[in-house]
Image: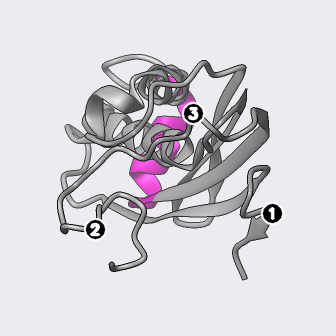
Amino acid sequence: MSGLTHIDETGRANMVDVSAKPATAREAIAQGFVRMAPETLALALSGDARKGDVRATAEIAGVMAAKRTSELIPLCHPLMLSKVEVRVSEAEGGLAVTARVRTTGQTGVEMEALTAVSVACLTLYDMLKAAEKGMVIEAVRLISKSGGASGDWSAP
């Protein structure tokens, strides 16, 4: 056995059985970054991009993506999310995306937070690509998670 929870004793992919786990409060925070030229950043911050308010649209896209994570990632459990917050903010060299996801359930929300950030970053790229095709999506990662049997974790 590999120690991976999505691989069974025969090496086959398998959805983890969480039916015996107690429901607990869980939260995950993820971040990502879209690096872009100063002119593209100014356009994004102005709200005057041809496709509209890129930050607000990316935030909504991230929320929608978090809610559909189990349809995108094959072995994720469908979860009843109690809170999804996605924020796009100015940062040096581009736009930072942060997602915070909460639930009370039998499994964590790390994948929902990471999916929210990823789709928000892709949405920013889509909405700004007419201005700059060389933008770079980077540093998508889990920042922290809390709850569940494995307890709390924070990125170093």
Q: Residue 91, relative to residue 110: is it above or below?
A: below
Q: Is residue 19 left or right of residue 140?
A: right
Residue carrying label 2: 9
Q: Tell me residue 136's x, y (percent).
A: 32, 63
Q: Residue at x 39, y 61 (%)?
A: 37
Magenta segment, which residues?
34-48
Q: Residue at x 55, y 40 (%)?
A: 18
Query: Which three-letter amino acid code belongs to the residue tagged 2?
Result: Glu
**CB under 8 Å between callouts 2 and 1?**
no
What is the secondary structure assignment of the residue under circle 2? loop
What's the colour scheme? one colour
Q: Mark 2 Cα within 10 Å, few/some/many (few <14, many 20+)?
A: few
Q: CA distance from mark 2 to mark 3?
A: 19 Å
Camera-side mark, 3 or 1: 3
**2 or 3: tag closer to the N-terminus:** 2
Q: Is residue 47 magenta?
A: yes
Q: Mark 1 Cα within 10 Å, few/some/many (few <14, many 20+)?
A: few
Please tell me the numbered disc located at residue 17.
Answer: none
Query: Which three-letter amino acid code belongs to the residue tagged 1?
Result: Asp
Q: Is residue 145 left or right of residue 114?
A: right
Query: Which three-letter amino acid code belongs to the residue tagged 3?
Result: Ser
Residue carrying label 1: 152
**2 or 1: tag closer to the N-terminus:** 2
What is the secondary structure assignment of the residue under circle 1? loop
Residue 92 picture quarter: bottom right
**Front position in the image: 118 or 16:** 16
**CB under 8 Å between callouts 2 and 3?**
no
**Front position in the image: 129 or 74:** 74
Q: Residue at x 74, y 51 (%)?
A: 148
